[in-house]
Image (cartoon, rainbow, N blue to C red):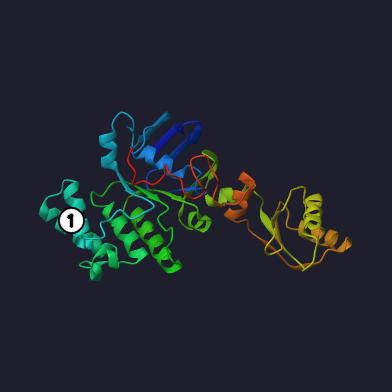
Amino acid sequence: MTNAVHATGLVKAFGDFRAVDGIDLTVPAGQIFGVLGPNGAGKTTMLKMLATLLPIDGGEAHLFGVDVRREPHRIRQLVGVTGQYASVDENLTATENLRMFGRLQGLSRADSRATAADLLGRFGLEEAADRAISQFSGGMRRRLDLAASLIKRPPLIFLDEPTTGLDPRTRGQMWDTIRDLVADGCTVLLTTQYLDEADQLADRIAVIDRGSKVAEGTPEDLKSSVGASTLQLRLADGTDRVHAAEVVERILGVAPALTPESGRLSAPLADADRAADVLIALRQVGLGVQSVSVDRPTLDEVFLALTGHDAGDQNDPAGPAGDDRHDPLEVAA
C-alpha cells in the first residue's frame, strides 16, 4: 500500500522547548488518519512541518515519496491545508473568495469560475454564493475554508481541528464532508482534541501527548489495550470517594479514574465477572453505589490510561494552555 505520509524522528524546538519530540508517523493513502491530543500537544506544529510552513529541526518526512525538506515546492502541490481559523477574506463573497484562491493557484479565469461554482455546490453553499463572508455562520466559514483547500484537488488534505467551535449539527455535516473526501480518493490527516471525532472518523489514530507519540492503532485496538470492558460506578451521595477508589484498585489491581464532580469511578476490566467482586467489596466496607454498568472502553479511558490525565488543555512552555503561539497554520515560517 502506498504511504501518503512517512515521517521518522520529527523534531521541532522553540528554544529549550521541544514542541515535537521524535514523532514517527505513517499514513497509508486513501484513509482518514487521526492525530489525537489536547491543545499544546504539538499536533499543529507537526502539521506545519509536513506542510513546509515550519522547517524540520530533526528527522525526515516524505509525502507520496517526495522529500519535504528537499522539494518543498512539489510538496505544496500535493497538499491542501485547512487550519484552525478560517483564512477567507470577510470583505468578499464566497464566490469571490474561491475565484481569488483559484487565480492565486494558477488557474485561468474560466477555470477559477468553474471550480468555484463546483465547490460551492459540493459544500452546499450555492444559496450563499453572493453573500459577504461576514454574514456567514461559523459552520459555513469552515466549509468554505475547506472548499478553498480543494481548489487544485490535492491528493492529501491536512485538517487541523476542523470542527472546533461548531455546534453538534454542523459538526456532523463536516464529518460527512470529510468522509466524502476520502470516498473521492483523497487521504485525510486530521488533528483533533475531540475523542468522539477521532472515534467516528479515523481509520487509525496516533495519540500525541507533550510532543511525543504515546500510542497508535485503530480505534478498536486502542480501546482493547485498556481492557475488554470498563466498569462504571456512580457512588452514592456522601460516599468516601478516595476510599472507594482504593477498594476498586485492591480488587482489580488497577487505579480507577475518578470524576469528582459526578462521583463516578471507571476502571478497565479484563474479565467482566470481576464487577461483582468489586460491588461485594464495596458493600462489605459500607460504601454505597448509586448505579453500576459494564461497558466497552472509550477513547477517554484510553487517553487517561496512556497519559495519566484527560484530554483537556496542557500548560506548556510555548504559551498558556490552549494558546499555542507556534501552532496556527496561518502563520508561515
Q: Which of 10 and 262 is in front in this view?
A: 262
Direction right: furthest residue: 284
Q: In this rendering, does residue 3 appear at all?
A: no
Residue 114: where, in percent of width, then height? Answer: 16, 58
Quarter placement of the N terminus: top left
Compared with residue 28, is residue 93 higher up or lower down, i.e. above or below? below
Q: Residue furthest front?
A: 320
* Quadrant of the frame with the C terminus: top left
The amino acid marked with disc number 1 is Arg
Q: Is mark 1 on a helix, strand or loop?
A: helix
Say which residue label 1 marks: 99
Judged left or right of residue 318, residue 76 is: left
| Residue 238: x %, y % from top left | 79, 67
Q: Residue at horizontal 72%, vertical 53%?
A: 256
Q: Residue at x 30, y 66 (%)?
A: 136
Task: Kindly tell me whether residue 321 is visible in this rendering.
Answer: yes
Q: Where is residue 331 in the image (x, y as percent from the top left)?
A: 34, 44
